[in-house]
Image (cartoon, rainbow, N blue to C red):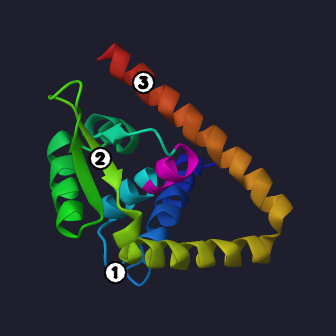
Amino acid sequence: MENINENLLSTWLRLSTSVVNSRLVSDLSYNESLVCNILYNTQRMEPNQLLTATDLCNATKMLKSQMNRTLNQLENKKLITRIRSSSDKRQVFVKFNLDTADIYLEQHQKILALIDNIIEHFGPEKVEVTLRVLTSICDVADDAIKNMERKE
């Protein structure tokens, strides 16, 4: 159990950087990929739900300035469109452009192929158990961060 915190941190970082491998995500930055993934999944699961930059900041933990830069880059690559709300002109929604999303979708397929390889190697049952454990770790980490922020 000695150094378990360092080992968990090292493994967590290693897992995070595995997906950011330059051969898998060469056309988009990590932040661009992260935002595209959130928009893509939201559009697939809840087609009528529109997200704002603030929603994306909350989901990614990015600063507003980072998010604005990322959205500008994605807009220049024609991966997103910003739509001003008709009811509240201050609100701007971000929509993922599936019809021009080849760059993201190709990258997404490469990452899914890597994940399929992992599932094949370990088996779906072990992966399901691992998912439950990792989800629990993420939930505890989120709660710990919220508690730390409340104390500040």
**What crowding class fits label 2: few (fewer than 14 Cα within 10 Å), some (14-19), or many (20 or more)?**
some
For disc 2, the marked residue is 94
For disc 3, the marked residue is 146
Of the two numbered discs 3 and 1 on the same chain, state the one appearing first in sequence: 1
Query: Where residue 133 appears, x then y in whole percent?
Result: 70, 46
Front residue of 55 and 43: 43
For disc 1, the marked residue is 26
Mark 2, secondary structure of its residue: strand
| Amino acid type, residue under disc 1 in the picture | Ser
Front residue of 47 and 147: 47
| Amino acid type, residue under disc 3 in the picture | Lys
Compute the Cα span from label 3 to label 1: 33 Å
Compute the Cα span from label 3 to label 2: 27 Å
Give the magenta part as a residue range.
40-46
Of the two numbered discs 1 and 2 on the same chain, state the one appearing first in sequence: 1
Q: Residue at x 78, y 54 (%)?
A: 128
